[in-house]
Image (tube, grey):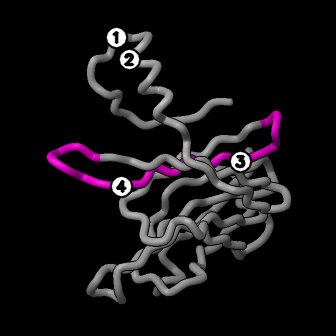
Amino acid sequence: ETNKRIEVAVYDGTHKEIARAFYNCPAEYKYLRYMNAYTYGSSFTYIAVYGYNTHHSGGDDSRIYIARLKNGNNTFKSVELPYTDDFDETRCEMSFNKKAGVLNFILHTTVSEKKGKTTYRTIFQPVHPEGFKVDSAFDLPLGKINDYAKSNLGYKKDFEGIPQDVYI
């Protein structure tokens, strides 16, 4: 049962359960993979979910969803990230920017794998937690890190790496 694969339970500081729900994917995917979660104070819990099918389970297709569970409720509100059509192996980090009041999702997706070298695309997706407004996403300009590594750190080869976390 696709709608009973990911269950989220949220507890307050006294270990009292304040929300519990199964994630209900808005599309028909055979496989759902939990990516990450962030609890926004005592109001909401956000999760990122990777839904996908294989060639044998309904056709090669995948999407990433951001879902919000309001504390006290038992259902998620979900938004598909439209640019994630057919993303391959993808990871997600989340952090909150207090000054801007924005929840930041950082997605790392595999673009290619050649001769033991993996190339990633890193996307920054801001979300306003109160109104669940998803702003425009943008690719992080990681080429600037490469330029810095070569000019200031003496790197001869291109820098290889992806952000592991974001602190603002």
Mark 4 vs mark 2: give the one in front: 2
125 and 21: which one is in front? 125
Determine which residue is flagged by label 4.
Answer: 111
Please indicate whether residue 49 sits to the left or right of residue 70 in the image.
left
Between discs 4 and 2, the one toward the N terminus: 4
Q: CA distance from mark 2 to mark 3?
A: 32 Å
Q: CA distance from mark 2 to mark 1?
A: 5 Å
What amino acid type should be assigned to the residue bearing mark 3?
A: Leu
Q: What residue is at 28 percent from the left and 83 percent from the top?
A: 55
| Residue 163 against residue 85 in the figure, above or below | above
Mark 4 secondary-structure assignment: strand
Between discs 4 and 3, the one toward the N terminus: 3
Asked if disc 2 and disc 3 are in contact, CB closer than 8 Å, the reply is: no
Write down the quadrant of residue 156 in the picture: top left
Determine which residue is flagged by label 3.
Answer: 103
Write down the quadrant of residue 62 in the picture: bottom left
Mark 4 vs mark 3: give the one in front: 4
Q: CA distance from mark 1 to mark 4?
A: 27 Å
What span is in magenta?
A: 98-118
Residue 103 in the image: state x and y as whole percent: 71, 47
Q: CA distance from mark 4 to mark 3?
A: 25 Å
The numbered mark at residue 154 is: 1
What amino acid type should be assigned to the residue bearing mark 4?
A: Val
Q: Is residue 114 magenta?
A: yes
Q: CA distance from mark 4 to mark 2?
A: 23 Å
17 and 47: which one is in front? 47
Please indicate whether residue 66 sits to the left or right of residue 70 in the image.
left
Mark 3 secondary-structure assignment: strand
Please indicate whether residue 109 sits to the left or right of residue 71 in the image.
left
Asked if disc 4 and disc 3 are in contact, CB closer than 8 Å, the reply is: no
Between discs 1 and 3, the one toward the N terminus: 3
Determine which residue is flagged by label 2.
Answer: 150
